[in-house]
Image (tube, grey):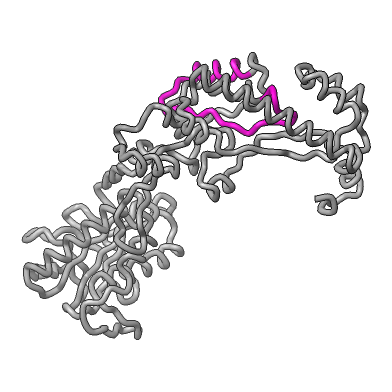
Amino acid sequence: NRDRHPLPAQVEASMNSRRIGVGFTGLGDMLAQLRLKYDTPEAVAFVDRLFERIKLEVYDASADLAREKGAFPKFDPDRHLSSPFFADFPEDLREKIRGGLRNGALLTVPPVGSGSVLAGVSSGIEPIFALWYIRRSESLSQEEFRVYHPLVKTYKELTGASDEDLPDFFVTAHEIDPFFRVRMQAVIQKHIDHSISSTVNLPKETPKETIAKVYLEAWRQGCKGITVYREGSREGILITESQAEEKTALTPRPRDVVLDGRTYKVRTDMGNVYITVNRNGGGPMEVFVHLGKSGSTLMAFAEALGRLVSLALRSGVKPVHVIRQLEGIKSGPAIRQPDGSFVFSVPDAIAKVLRRFLDEMKHVPRQEEKPEAPVTVAPVQGVVLTPPKDSLAVGDLCPECGAVMVEANGCATCMQCGYSRCG
């Protein structure tokens, strides 16, 4: 990277020290393969010896390279070896280092996020984050399936173990004793001349007092830095399977007594369909679908479809996702609309109406922002809006059958039973 720095002074500084970062990944997998549970004294002691060995080998190699190619220009043997980092180096290696080092610093622990994924191993010095995660197929069956951490998958294939029978050395980041997690980082830090990227993962219910103690323990242990993440404290971060299940257990928003919206008349192969879209201040919240002159089966189909779309919208599903699922579904011949467009089915009609509603709402202020103006209130609670072109205004409920009434030919009319307020 010598020639990639923007300033000449940066190029000179980088060449004066020739810092490199020999990194690590897969530590969590290695401990599991050795049947060492991450948060045990045995694992911490083993990692201490391992990283000491790596440190000495790396520095020995840098001293060899210095003999071959020269030491880094700013090398000062007395000043360099006076650092506490070299206090426990064997005397013969200290003397070899006195003759020169190719690099001013050599070791680091990077995050190794994408690299560890490509290698199929645990990341950096982190424990295994999760033994499996849930993935959903969007393009095929749309069913959920479990994806195992590569080492867990291999172990299950070799031993025939079930998910419930996995040994305790397959411990995950949220199960580990956080103070042992700090101890593990601290013993590795002793053998790293740069810094360490490492995160203490804590369950959602962890109290703030425990978090404070983790930070203090890291300071006592001599860590250069520490990252503590309590699950759920930030959006868009990796979560455990249980947290994912909790997030997906959606509760529909309650419906206000009065909503405003619009009713659209659309021609379909099943006849005219009247689609009402209501909003609650912002985007669409519910959809009612009524087929003009249809049998009971088709009417039940239309009502069920409207209810499911409404449930999705009230549960936080973005309208664009509903549109993508319904748009283009075909049940018969394409029916030409007054504006020249075509509708292929009732689901396709709902999608097109939702898309039109979203476009029209861009030009209408939110409900709470609208200036005060007189509205027409029907005897049964509801709000009648002035109908836009090619649409009908929302009315109240029919006193005869309970269906949504619409404004037709200047009079509130029920399209299901034919009741008319004018009559």
- Residue 204 screen position, x and y as percent: 42, 29
- Residue 232 screen position, x and y as percent: 45, 34
- Count of labels in the image: 0
Q: Is residue 157 visible?
A: yes
User: In the drawing, does residue 377 fall left or right of residue 9?
Assistant: left
Is residue 175 or residue 266 the one in the foreground? 175
User: In the drawing, does residue 108 fall left or right of residue 138?
Assistant: right
Q: Residue at x 45, y 63 (%)?
A: 362
User: In the drawing, does residue 343 fall left or right of residue 370?
Assistant: left
Q: Work out whether 371 lies above or below 113.
A: below
Q: Which residues are magenta?
A: 189-218
- Residue 28 screen position, x and y as percent: 51, 33
Is residue 343 or residue 168 the one in the foreground? 168
Most extreme residue toward the front is 92
Is residue 320 or residue 197 the one in the foreground? 197
- Residue 419 screen position, x and y as percent: 8, 68
Whether 199 is among the magenta residues is: yes
Q: Quadrant of residue 370?
A: bottom left
Q: Work out whether 361 lies above or below 246.
A: below
Q: Quadrant where the C terminus lies?
A: bottom left
Q: Is residue 247 visible?
A: no
Q: Quadrant of residue 277?
A: bottom left
Q: Work out whether 331 lies above or below 153.
A: below
Q: Residue at x 77, y 21 (%)?
A: 85
Most extreme residue toward the top is 220
Q: Residue at x 47, y 41 (%)?
A: 238
Whether 280 is among the magenta residues is: no
Q: Residue at x 89, y 43 (%)?
A: 69
User: In the drawing, does residue 235 fall left or right of residue 277?
Assistant: right
